[in-house]
Amino acid sequence: MAEIWQGKLEKIDDYKWRIPVTYKPGMKVPGIIYADEELLPGILSDKAPEQVANVAFLPGIVKYSLAMPDIHWGYGFCIGGVAATDIERGGVISPGGVGYDVNCGVRLVRSDLRHEEIKGKLEELVNALYHGIPAGVGSKGDIRVSVEEEERLLLQGSEWCIKKGYGTKEDLECTEDGGRIEGADPTKVSDRAYERGKGQSGTLGSGNHFLEIQTVDQIYDKEVAEKMGIFLGQITIMIHSGSRGLGYQVCDDYVKSMVHCLSKYNINVPDRQLACAPLDSEEAKAYLGAMRCAANYAWANRQNLMHLTRLIFERVLGKGWQKLGLFLVYDVAHNIAKIEKHKIDGKEKSLCVHRKGATRAFPSGHPDLPKRYRDIGQPVIIPGDMGRNSFLLVGTEGASESFYSTCHGAGRVLSRSAAIRACRGRRIDKELLEKKGIIVRASGRGTIEEEAPEAYKDISEVVNVVHEAGLSRRVARMRPLGVIKG
Amino acid sequence: MKRFEIIEHTADIGLRAYGKDLKGLFNNVAIGMFKIMGLNSSIKEKDRIKIKVDSDTYENLLVNWLSELLFQFNKTKIFFRRFLIKKFGDFYILAEAIGQKIDFQTFKFGDEIKAVTYHDLKVEKTKSGWRCNLIFDV
């Protein structure tokens, strides 16, 4: 682990800390880290705070470089970073501020089932999901997408799946951006990216991606929970995946091309991984066109994964998925850049909001929300590690200061090798089963150890900070029962 | 001489590699990358492909070299274990990557490397040769 960060940090209140703009010459705005006294020592133990300061160098950055409480050391941007740039003031877009897994995100599926009802079937369900959902490095799926269809999928996202019969219109309504972001341009996606994404739609991938059967074990806001169709003791399903090889290659292609933009546009950033280009440049437009294709690919991927899950539940439980009540609560992206309208000092501005490991969290009344959620706010889905909880929150007006963004997960505290060392001689899957009754299945060697609960921050502490800081509000808590890892 | 070692990184994986010359360094760093992905003795030298990359600095050449190997691995499914660098110049490489085609469904992978990043990237001359640092997105 790296040494303790020695930079300047000023306490604003119990949940907010500032890196002053004077910390490093070249910073255009201050950095803000959302954390409490408990989380702070962990945050200062790697290079993440330095990365918050580095992001503040981006041309056109507005207000501050933000970090959510699940912040940890990334590359270029920290994970948990949010930065908005002003198009009219020379603002840039940085592929590193989106990440390689473009539109990595999470969806939450509710059910009419109660935990007690399926206790006896749980192991069969987990095993059926493990065998039926393609997972692991370079996994390929049963959902076939022909070459001509691939382009349509990149343009249409989840809508493509609905046309193929892999879901319903209601699913689209419950997906951020309706599962299809406008402005995708398949001609800006390289042959290499097509090649890497080939056959991977409807596959989970590896690393921290997962599919989880959960039960709701705590309700914080009964009224809002009810409006989202959530009740105590209910079975829910959470799916965490992204744009697979296609997204990795899109990011790789454009980071490489934008490294050269730094000298071309005379941009000074302290880390080449922050390579970027002015939003009105040809390079930025090309990246936006390609990145949006990858985002649509990811939404289609999660839609396809949910479709496969519904079919498996139907088969094991012998009832149609509608009868089982397997409806989508919501789907959020947590690695993405979007052009959004925000009020800055009383004036409406068009900003490019980068969310690198952060979730959009619109408040009630926001025009971009589907009707069913407009009077309560956007559902925000925050997955935890495989041994503890996940949370369902709702967007609040307080998040206007973070460009309507909140945290995205627990955030790592141990490196992968440190996690493996901590687990040496132990069987984490057995421990989880014996101590907590959680059934875990993973395809990769070492995945379970690398993803062990102690490798992550305590999700409850992270969620507590965003709740107290007013970035979003707790609605319900889920506990894992069965976990499929890549 | 140590060929490479893993650098601790909270979310991803870093690699430090060494070589008595640049050719050796680029060879060792490639072996390190495939070790992270699960290279083991079951991989034989059966299949080979030609690799050609260029760039404008040693750092950028290193990223291009590893990115190309990663892309070819994903495309051809050949898990590489040996690299014959035939020509190494300022700033280009002509090489052959040798390994064995694997079945992605059954192979016991290590960590999936999504990409080679520019973060904390360094290629530098030392008293005894060359050294590099880099971070992979996993």
Image (cartoon, rainbow, N blue to C red):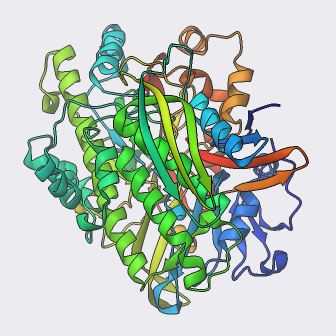
Image quadrant assignment for residue A196: top left
**Residue that protrudes farthest toward the front in the picture:** B86
Question: Residue A368: horizontal and vertical position, in percent?
Answer: 30, 69
Q: Residue at x 77, y 79 (%)?
A: A21
Tell which of A437 and A452 is nearer to you: A452
With respect to residue A92, does A463 lie above or below?
A: above
Tell which of B98 and A459 is nearer to you: B98
State whether residue A340 appears in this view. Answer: no
Left or right: A46 as drawn, with respect to A112: right
Question: Residue A362: horizontal and vertical position, in percent?
Answer: 42, 65
Tell which of A310 and B137 is nearer to you: B137
Left or right: A264 as drawn, with respect to A33: left
Q: Residue at x 53, y 79 (%)?
A: A85
Question: Residue A471: horizontal and vertical position, in percent?
Answer: 56, 62
Q: Quadrant of the C terminus of chain A?
A: top left
With respect to residue B40, does A478 lie above or below?
A: below
State whether residue B63 appears in this view. Answer: yes
Question: Residue B95: horizontal and vertical position, in percent?
Answer: 52, 43
Q: Residue at x 26, y 56 (%)?
A: A179
Tell which of A432 and B20 is nearer to you: B20
Left or right: A200 as drawn, with respect to A2: left
Q: Residue at x 14, y 15 (%)?
A: A318
